[in-house]
Image (cartoon, grey):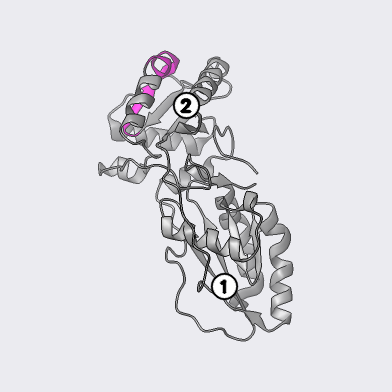
């Protein structure tokens, strides 16, 4: 089990979701009648979870291509969706998932089985589909009579994007500084690193500069985006980031910005991450 805190790789998924990535469905479940020869399952995910996007974008499409109309599915985003999160926990509890494993995403419910994590889903899903097809198919799990779930009120947290170049001389000092802040604030500070050594990240950063009217700094200069505020260079980051974290925590925290909204000049709401089984309210991402 991994808690995403300071991610130094694999953030293409983060960028894609921040630029308006959408899933197939946002509802909980459609009205559906079981059909023979069809296997149905639900995938619970968080839009800020890299492991979820790896499964959704790279693995599950191969499953849909393999099985065609013999498989039907629904995706439920639990990010800032308390009802969806409670349904996920209720299903996990009713199906006997051990308490320490509950609440992690991605979580896929198929028949009476719950697959949790970016490794478990690819390892087991197709075998279960074959098993249920041999039995004549299986419908979506019933949401009736689920156990009552009480979701704790999440503590405020501050999520930031950290644009950095691991080849830049400031990288080591910046990393130590961010780790120090993470130790100070715990789950109240959640940095997500984006390596500007790749072209996609550079293009995203260029759009942010344009939207905020900021001049691009020298190549490799680290930058931190917190809400609509861009801190440029190690000196400014070290001087201003701790105070900004304190300010935003006092106001209830702030989530990762939606970059489409940022460029369009629309409001970016302050919000805490998805509630999870801990008091911190930080989602658990399962590898």
The x, y position of residue 191, in whole percent, is: 48, 31
Question: Does residue 216 appear in the picture of this structure?
Answer: no
Q: Tell me where the magenta segment starts and ends, as one range.
A: 227-239
User: Considering the numbered disc 1 on the image, is that residue within a helix, a strand or a loop?
Assistant: loop
Mark 1 surroundings within 10 Å by alpha-carbon count, few (fewer than 14), some (14 through 19), many (20 or more): some
Question: Does residue 104 appear in the picture of this structure?
Answer: yes
The x, y position of residue 246, in whole percent, is: 36, 25
Frontmost residue, 218 versus 21: 21
Mark 2 surroundings within 10 Å by alpha-carbon count, few (fewer than 14), some (14 through 19), many (20 or more): some
Residue at mark 1:
141
Q: Residue furthest bottom?
A: 36
The x, y position of residue 225, in whole percent, is: 39, 30
CA distance for labels 2 and 1: 39 Å
2 or 1: tag closer to the N-terminus: 1
Indicate left or right for 58 with 174 as reference: right
Picture quadrant where residue 269 is located: top left
């Amino acid at each position: 089990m991994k808690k995403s805190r300071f991610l130094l790789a694999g953030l293409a998924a983060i960028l894609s979701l921040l630029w308006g990535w959408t899933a197939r469905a946002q509802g909980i479940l459609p009205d559906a009648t079981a059909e023979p020869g069809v296997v149905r399952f639900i995938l619970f995910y968080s839009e800020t979870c890299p492991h979820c996007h790896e499964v959704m974008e790279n693995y599950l499409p191969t499953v849909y291509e393999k099985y065609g109309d013999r498989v039907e599915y629904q995706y439920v985003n639990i990010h800032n969706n308390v009802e969806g999160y409670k349904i996920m926990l209720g299903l996990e509890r009713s199906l006997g998932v051990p308490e320490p494993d509950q609440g992690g995403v991605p979580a896929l419910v198929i028949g009476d089985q719950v697959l949790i994590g970016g490794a478990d889903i690819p390892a087991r899903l197709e075998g279960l589909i074959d098993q249920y097809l041999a039995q004549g198919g299986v419908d979506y799990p019933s949401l009736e009579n689920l156990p009552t779930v009480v979701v704790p009120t999440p503590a405020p947290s501050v999520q930031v994007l950290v644009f950095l170049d691991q080849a830049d001389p400031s990288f080591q000092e910046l990393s130590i500084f961010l780790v120090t802040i993470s130790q100070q604030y715990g789950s109240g500070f959640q940095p997500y690193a984006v390596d500007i050594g790749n072209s996609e990240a550079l293009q995203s950063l260029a759009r942010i500069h344009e939207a905020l009217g900021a001049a691009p700094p020298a190549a490799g200069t680290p930058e931190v985006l917190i809400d609509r505020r861009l801190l440029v260079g190690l000196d400014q980051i070290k001087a201003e980031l701790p105070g900004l974290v304190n300010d935003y925590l006092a106001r209830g925290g702030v989530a990762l910005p939606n970059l489409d909204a940022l460029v369009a000049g629309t409001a970016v709401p302050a919000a805490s991450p998805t509630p999870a089984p801990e008091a911190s309210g930080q989602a658990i991402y399962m590898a």
